[in-house]
Amino acid sequence: MRAHENKFREILASFVLALLVVLGSAGLAAQTKPLVNVDADGLGLHGYDPVAYFAEGRAVKGDPQFRASFGGSTYYFKSSANQAAFEREPNRYAPRYGGYCAMAMAMGKLEDIDPNQFLVHDGKLMLQRNEKAHLMFAKDPAGNSKKADENWAKLQSQRGN
């Protein structure tokens, strides 16, 4: 019986060590990602129009001829009217958490988004990485927003922003 206990402890120790390595790598990856979710060209929201989420209540692909930059990201708009609205009030329309998934931020992570998974909560654009994250966030948008705000503030202070 002693041999079985030792083997179990050895397996458990290996598992815990592997888990720590994985979690440490995930945390390190989140820490090294930029605080603005953009592609290689600096485009945010995967080219979707941030104003359309508010004006139309849906994700609408933007047109590169209508563009504006704000907070380290370039955004495309479906029309010059949406571009002008954004330029007047960029803080109103820009996505929260640098354009990263709001549910992931509530969990202390930086994750990319699916532009079709979103919620406008308390006048703020909150995007999600997938339908599961969207449903989780939508169950308690106030509580999840609060957690995400706290984690975002911590992440920014760690980075000196």
Image: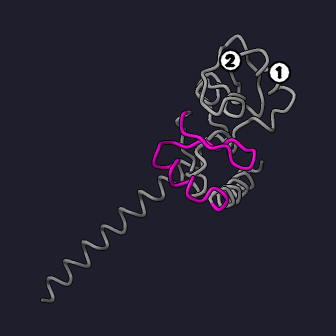
Colouring method of the image:
one colour
Mark 2: few/some/many CA within 10 Å (<14, 14-19, 20+): many
Residue sitting at x 83%, y 21%: 84
Residue 84 - label: 1
Q: Which residues are magenta?
A: 116-143
When the figure is inspected, residue 9 is found, relative to residue 95, above or below; the finding is below
Q: Position of residue 103 (x, y in %)?
A: 57, 52
- State the CA–CA distance, disc 2 to disc 1: 11 Å
| Location of residue 147 (image quadrant) | bottom right
* Amino acid type assigned to the residue bearing label 2 in the image: Lys
* The stretch drawn in magenta includes residue 80: no
* Amino acid type assigned to the residue bearing label 1 in the image: Ala
* The stretch drawn in magenta includes residue 125: yes
In the picture of the structure, the residue carrying the numbered disc 2 is 78
Secondary structure type for disc 2: loop
Q: Position of residue 119 (x, y in %)?
A: 62, 44
Secondary structure type for disc 1: helix
Image quarter in which the N terminus is found: bottom left
Q: Position of residue 154 (x, y in %)?
A: 70, 58
Q: Position of residue 64 (x, y in %)?
A: 66, 13
Q: Residue furthest right?
A: 88
Label 2 or label 1, whichever comes before in sequence order: 2
When the figure is inspected, residue 62 is found, relative to residue 97, above or below; the finding is above
Tally of numbered discs: 2
**Residue 133 in the figure: left or right of residue 98:** left
| Location of residue 38 (image quadrant) | top right
**Residue 72 in the figure: left or right of residue 89:** left
Residue sitting at x 62%, y 36%: 37
Q: Residue furthest bottom?
A: 1
Mark 1: few/some/many CA within 10 Å (<14, 14-19, 20+): some
When the figure is inspected, residue 80 is found, relative to residue 8, above or below; the finding is above
